[in-house]
Amino acid sequence: MKTILFSLSILVSTTLFSQNKKITEEIINFKTMDQNKKNIVFSKISSELNISFVITANNGNSKDYTNCEWKSFLSYNAMVSFVEQLSVVDIKKEKVIKYNNFVIKVKKT
């Protein structure tokens, strides 16, 4: 009986996880015009179970800068909070907004 239950649980788990297809969809892609140019991409990752987001950034390689890349994964709730915090940023004041998953720094140029 235990072997039948064990086999059945493996079959059900495999079936559930194999049907959980992840679809990545690019939302926006932009490049900075700094001396060390950066490419920043916001993407949405959808599956049958949940929605999450990823922010990918990389910069070019030059004689003054070393190439690097990073990815930051945000849950749906963290992304909603990120967007809400961006909407209240006052660009006339230099300030820092801290959250569990991110820090927003406003700098005058």
Image: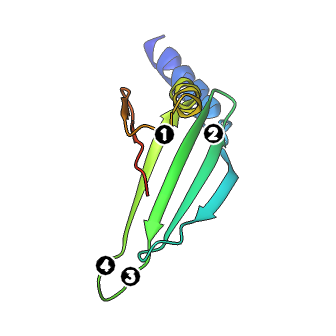
Mark seen at residue 59 = none
- Give the spatial CA distance, label 3 vs label 4: 6 Å
Residue 24 position within the rendered picture, expressed as x and y whole percent measured from the top left: 66, 49
- Between label 2 and label 3, give the one nearer the viewer: 3
- Give the spatial CA distance, label 4 vs label 2: 42 Å
- Give the spatial CA distance, label 1 vs label 3: 33 Å
Residue at x 42%, y 37% (from the top left corner): 93
Say which residue label 4 marks.
65
Say which residue label 2 marks.
18
- Along the horizontal axis of the image, is 70 left or right of 82? left
- Between label 1 and label 3, give the one nearer the viewer: 1
Say which residue label 1 marks.
92
Q: Secondary structure at mark 4?
A: loop
Q: Secondary structure at mark 1?
A: loop
Name the kind of residue labelled 1 in the image: Lys
Q: Secondary structure at mark 3?
A: loop
Q: Nearer the viewer, residue 54 or 94?
A: 94
